[in-house]
Amino acid sequence: MVVYLKNKFSDAGTATLFAARFFKEVFRPPLEIKEFLRQCYILGYKSLVLVGITAFIMGLVMTLQSRPTLVEFGAEAWLPGMVALSLVKEIAPVITAVICAGKIASAIGAELGSMKVTEQIDAMEVSAVNPYKYLVVTRVLATTLMIPLLVIFADAIGIFGSYISMNIHTDITLFRFLSKALGSIEFIDIIPATIKTFFFGFFIGMIGCYKGFTAANGTESVGRAANAAVVSASITIFVIDMIAVQITDLFL
Amino acid sequence: MQKSQESTQEDVVRTGKPIIEIKGLHKSFGKSNDILKGLDLTVNEGENLVVLGKSGSGKSVLIKCLVGLIRADQGEISVFGNNITTLDSNNLNAVRIRMGFLFQNAALYDSMTVRENLAFPLKRHQKDISDEDLDKTIRESLDSVGLEEAIDKMPSELSGGMRKRIGLARTLILKPEIMLYDEPTTGLDTITSREISELILAIQKKNKTTAIIITHDMACAKLTADRIVVLKEGVMEAEGTYESLENSEDEWIRSFFI
Amino acid sequence: MKNEAGFTWKLGMFVVVGLILFIAAIYIVGKQKNFFGSTFKVRTQFANVSGLKVGNNVRFSGINVGTVDDIQLVTDTTVAVLLVIKEDVQPFIKSDATATIGSDGLMGDRVLTINSGSARAAAIKDNGFIKSLSSVEMEDLMASVKTSLDNAGLITGELASFTHKMNNNNGALSRLMYDEGFSNSLKSTLSNLQTSTNEFAKFASNMNNEGGALAKLNDPEFGEKLDSTMSNLQSGTKGLSDNMEAAKNNFLLRGFFKKKKKAEEKKQNELKKQEEQRRKQQLKLAKERQEKGDTTVPAVPVVPADTTKTLIP
């Protein structure tokens, strides 16, 4: 039991040191700009279709599902505002982050895990290139900046999906719909929702890298690293979301 | 953080003949898993040293300790007169640049083409290199392993022997003074193994490098070795030329040569 | 390297479009909050802001022109409210404008409405003060709705009893509506009336024709004769009454007149007594009837709704 606890604590300690190293390395030049841009492209741009489809469907389905209840109260006019508000505040950030945890964290975990297993990370190390800087800093930085961007796309596409589904039942022009949808949103809704997406991005990248970097030797540990990355990243996203909402609630 | 090759050569003092000196090296994983138990070893400049031993006898751990991938628990490792075990990361990197390490599976970067693989260390240690010089150096290095046509291929498109040779080219591109080979012929057919072994010899002759070769392959050992060291349970069991060990009185040592 | 240039422009497009979307959203939201564009401030005071919050809309002529910027309790019965309003509408808000708090729909947000002042008053200045009208509270609204509902209940109750009686009782209206015999008799009455009026018409025409005694009444000559006859009669009777008076005063006849007077007084007293007795008897009878429960029903009575049941035979 004591050994088990000790192992768990030492795991937590390793993870903390691993994350702390990021802040040490990120400010130390030279930054691997090219690799950073490449990761932004792979992790950001290439996730856009997936995130877009999910956000579109979320917007569409939420509008269709909320509609009967609101119609019952004669508050159908609230539908665009309500859907837009829940998309921007909660649904789009969390769904995008969870989708990206599935796609990005697992990809990073598997990639770095296999690099670790096939000694590519060691090879970098012995060629006197800092693998942490080249592999971890670029990826974590890329996810930290790309996830918020993806969330903005998800917001926009989700609201568009909501517009499409509104048009199934009633005729409403896009301009009027947008003015209604955006009319309900205030800075207090946008700012905390955007700030938390940076944390989502950071942790998605960081957990993927950590799980990949600490993969044991052997091919089967690559799969385990990818799996562990997805599970940990998803849980972490919900925990961060809970903390973020509580903090927002406390101060605003 | 990474100093250029020129400045590091000033930092490191050359100490004449013995280029690597290992004294009382200990390394254990966990409490009861002792791998190296007080190993002593000296490698002289310009020689090809082959290290033999059963699996788990600590051969791989030995050369990983040499480049600082694994930190030794106890003992002293002196490379170019610098104690690897006490160097900080900047000085360690300065020493590492002068050493080449060929991994068991070549460890090519999967996400990059052959060209990018070779350019990767070069760009980071010679930052002001022009594109033409870079291309020229890459082609020269590939030419020396006889695979210039593979320059724009991805590592996944290459066979095992080709990967080994590309790995070798990538290691050689920084013109190291010491080469460390971790089982260079494992997993290859006998003809390809022979080609790799000949390549190791050619490199030694061309670049005047010192090399430590870890292998099970006796054909490779016979071809490349100037001197052979046999490890057993974390310490050096025997030392000598190929011929002298082949005719050793020790039954256990002779069993390697059958 | 070819693939590098390939991904760079896609990445650039991705980042630029994302940032444009974000900035556009910030701008649109900011515009609603009056974060951009020039604004001015207006102060007002309420006794009760009924749930008005910072950030609620300010309406003028039904247009959103600003937001509530600050709400502060000044004393136990005064709340100071600071409004931020677009500068464009400043000339239209007069210094005697008033502020009220309403709600946006039945369940909606609170809205502060500025009612335009008189046209002649000067436009409001920056940081100017406007008066407030106490807002219509939901409870007040509900209370007034309740009294009208109560009244409506009373009216419909009365109506119900009325229609019920009309349908079931033998009242005049119900007979009018439903009793065939009654309607037949009414019909015959009407036809009789018609014949009698016909007769009357004949009579009237006869009367108008000259010759008949009655027709003579219409004759002016006859009238004059009648008049003179009557005046003669008057003078005749006057003479007679003078004679009578003289006779009364005559001592021979005085006794007779006295007796006559006394007899008359006696007769009157008897009459009074008889009348009293009759009244008593009637009262007795009435009492007896009431005890028996044999009350008669008024023709169209206004009876409270709850007593209708006992009245149904």
Image (cartoon, coloured by chain):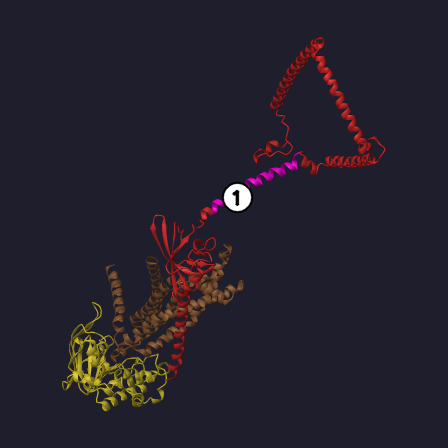
Chain colours: A brown, B yellow, C red
* Quarter of the image with the N terminus of chain B in it: bottom left
Task: Point out residue C119 in the picture as x, y percentages from the top left corner.
Answer: 47, 58
Is C19 on the left-hand or right-hand side of A66?
A: left
Task: Point out residue C214 in the picture as x, y percentages from the top left corner.
Answer: 81, 31
Residue carrying label 1: C149
Q: Is residue C142 above or below residue C246?
A: below
Judged from the image, the secondary structure of the residue bearing numbered disc 1 is helix
Task: Point out residue B66 in the picture as x, y percentages from the top left corner.
Answer: 20, 78
Dot 1 amino acid type? Leu
Q: Is residue C197 magenta?
A: no
* Quarter of the image with the C terminus of chain B in it: bottom left
| Viewer-closest of B92 and B201 | B92
Is B98 on the left-hand or right-hand side of C234?
A: left
| Viewer-closest of C170 and C257 | C257
Residue drawn at 17 percent across, 76 percent down:
B85
| Viewer-closest of B4 and C180 | C180
On the question of residue B212 being in view, the answer is no
Magenta region's main secondary structure? helix
Name the quadrant containing residue B87.
Answer: bottom left
Q: How many marks?
A: 1
Name the quadrant containing residue C165.
Answer: top right
Residue drawn at 46 percent across, 65 percent down:
A179
Name the quadrant containing residue C83.
Answer: bottom left
Q: What residue span does the magenta drawing correspond to?
A: C141-169
Residue ranking furthest to the right:
C211
| Viewer-closest of A246 and B147 | A246
Residue ranking furthest to the bottom:
B206
Task: Point out residue A135 in the picture as x, y percentages from the top left corner.
Answer: 30, 75
Q: Is residue C149 magenta?
A: yes
